[in-house]
Image (spheres, rainbow, N blue to C red):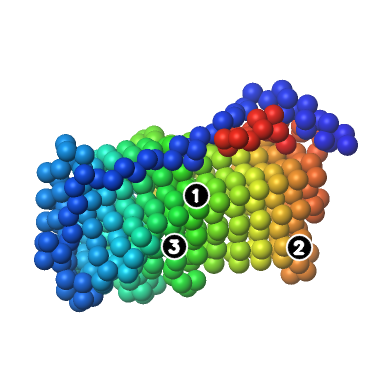
Amino acid sequence: MLVALLLLLALSNASNVYGGFEQCGLNPKLDPRPHMVSILEFGAVGDGKTLNTLALQNAIFYVKSFADKGGAQLYVPPGKWLTGSFNLTSHLTLFLEKGAVIIGSQDPSHWDVVEALPSYGRGKDVPEGRYKSLINGYKLEDVVITGNNGTIDGMGMVWWEWYNSHSLNHSRPHLVEIISSDSVVVSNLTFLNAPAYSIHPVYCSNVHIQNVSISTPPESPYTAGIVPDSSDNVCIEDCFVSIGYDAISLKSGWDQYGITYGRPAEKIHIRRVHLHAFSGSAISFGTEMSGGISNVLIEHVHIVNSNSGIDFRTTKGRGGYVKEIAISNIELENVYTAISTKGNCGSHPDDKFDPKALPLLNHITLKDIIGTNITIAGNFSGIEESPFTDICLSNITLSTNSVSSVKWECSNVSGFSDSVFPKPCQELDNPSNSSSSSCFYLTSPGENKSAGL
């Protein structure tokens, strides 16, 4: 009772209380484009064998002529459309009809090679550049990738073999990567077998990802579903992701490159998603977070059969911050570690990082969480020189199994809790902490702003 009263008192005095989070409340209005062309008009052949890269490039070049006339829709009819990497243009809707499958070529010569992203300084898999993603956009405005449940299949099997055998010449490509763009919509599609990430908006604003299904096999190495990277005003909703490593991963750059580039991931809303992450985490923050991650609302999430549920990752040399994160209404089933923070996780791009660049992690609120068949309830490991602070846990019930006798592990963290079972470690269950802590929370449209914890 005392803990609850102190918790409410701290909340009432908190300076970091926000309401009316609107990222997913502002559904983009997708007006029909005044013009439409089909890839068939440019010689595309949907037999799964003919390479259609040139046909797609020519079609998109033609569509550019409608940019100042309301834009155009590029229609992909049913068929199997083999292609290498290609670029989109502004004011374009790429529409995949039901039965349409865009297939990524397994010949690496069909994928362009580009420089590393400036906030990373090198490729993720190997230092020497990276393969361009299957579908790309750069400095675009008003671009839509949608359909009637069409499919984009990266045919990643060969890329996974090359990764596992250390025979990649460049870092693996993604399925969709949109860079430095505004007003991006991805919806109503199925994504299969991404070589690395499925959807990667980086340096973007106003991104809406809705009603997509993403799958790679459990054994696919370090594949990720949706990766908002140094992007703002992002909504991810009504999605299904079953992936080899991380289902949804928030990032913002790697060590000194991310610090110098200085673009955070912020104002991100994730809701009504069903996630399965075989060897990674259903929702992860970092480990590349050097530009900062903040102002994130995650709610109404179902996590099943995953190694980790919610995971905050960083390490010395990252710099940056993860703060002002509100997570609520989460259901977990068959998850090894429900919640974790790791202060010693991840590698460095090179030896030029500053080991004194310490990351900050604070004002993290997790509430209204239930879990069944959980092995470890929480593993909170901060950094001695930069402890993780103001971690608030409320109304959490995790039914644990007998695989591990240790249910909570804590070091270099502080915060407080109310109505949490199993009872958390002392660092998160000490009423004296509450006098100096404040719980951060966000509310989605229609939620009672005064609800708090």
Circle 3: residue type: Ile
Estimate the spatial distance between the alpha carbons at disc 3 and disc 2, rounded to whole Å: 29 Å
Estimate the spatial distance between the alpha carbons at disc 2 and disc 1, rounded to whole Å: 29 Å
Answer left or right for 263 relative to 414.
left
Q: Estimate the x, y position of residue 173 in percent, counting from the top left.
A: 31, 60
Estimate the spatial distance between the alpha carbons at disc 3 and disc 1, rounded to whole Å: 13 Å
The residue singled out by tag 2 in the image is 400
Reading the chain from its start, which is encountered first: label 3 or label 1?
3
- Circle 1 — which element? strand
In the picture, the quarter occupied by the C terminus is top right
Circle 1: residue type: Glu
Q: Is residue 302 above or below residue 305?
A: above
The residue singled out by tag 1 in the image is 237
- Circle 2 — which element? strand
Q: Nearer the viewer, residue 127 or 174?
A: 174
- Circle 3 — which element? strand
Q: Estimate the x, y position of residue 139 in percent, counting from the top left.
A: 25, 40
Q: Estimate the x, y position of residue 304 in percent, counting from the top left.
A: 61, 63
Asked whether residue 314 is in view, the answer is no
* Residue at 66% from the left image edge and 56% from the top image edge: 331
Circle 2: residue type: Thr
Asked whether residue 226 is in view, the answer is yes
Q: Nearer the viewer, residue 134 or 263?
A: 134
Alpha-carbon neighbours of circle 2 within 10 Å: few (<14), some, or many (≥20)? many
* Residue at 45% from the left image edge and 37% from the top image edge: 26
The residue singled out by tag 3 in the image is 214
Q: For residue 137, which numbered disc appears in the image?
A: none
Q: Mark 1 and mark 2 in contact (Cβ < 8 Å)? A: no
Alpha-carbon neighbours of circle 3 within 10 Å: few (<14), some, or many (≥20)? many
